[in-house]
Amino acid sequence: MRQGGYFLLELVVVLAVLGLMVSGVSTAYDNGNALRERGLAARAGDTLREAVRAFALTHARLPCPDTDGDGWEGGGGWEPVRKTSKRAGFPTAL
């Protein structure tokens, strides 16, 4: 005659099923975070590309890097826009 309560085997099965369910949910959550971060990075790249494009169209050159660490452009500059615009995907006519 069986008394009230659960067998150890029943508890193991229930815990195993719960563990599988939790791992499935956590994997889906991690994938959602990765997709969201990828989307944010793509939008940041698009914003940066548009900013460089606007600078190049306005000044007819690409921005110069900060060579001395003061937060402003250093001297020298980069290649002229007409040379690099085709490689960067910018319009060639300014």
Image (cartoon, rainbow, N blue to C red):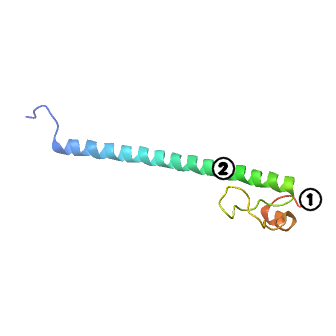
Q: Residue at x 92, y 59 (%)?
A: 93
Q: Position of residue 16 (x, y in %)?
A: 29, 47
Amino acid residing under circle 2:
Ala
Q: Nearer the viewer, residue 29 or 70?
A: 70
Q: Residue at x 71, y 62 (%)?
A: 65
Q: Position of residue 37 (x, y in %)?
A: 57, 49
Q: Where, quadrant-wise, is the N terminus in this rendering?
A: top left
Q: Residue at x 10, y 32 (%)?
A: 3
Amino acid residing under circle 1:
Ala
69 up-or-down from 39: above or below:
below
* Residue bearing mark 2: 44
Give SS at disc 2. Answer: helix
Give SS at disc 1. Answer: loop
Please indicate whether residue 18 sits to the left or right of residue 66 in the image. left
Most distant residue in the top direction: 4
Please indicate whether residue 84 sits to the left or right of residue 29 in the image. right
Q: Nearer the viewer, residue 60 or 39?
A: 60
Q: Position of residue 76 (x, y in %)?
A: 78, 67
Task: Say whether disc 1 or disc 2 marks the residue closer to the N-terminus.
Answer: 2
* C-beta proximity under 8 Å, tags 1 and 2: no
* Residue bearing mark 1: 93
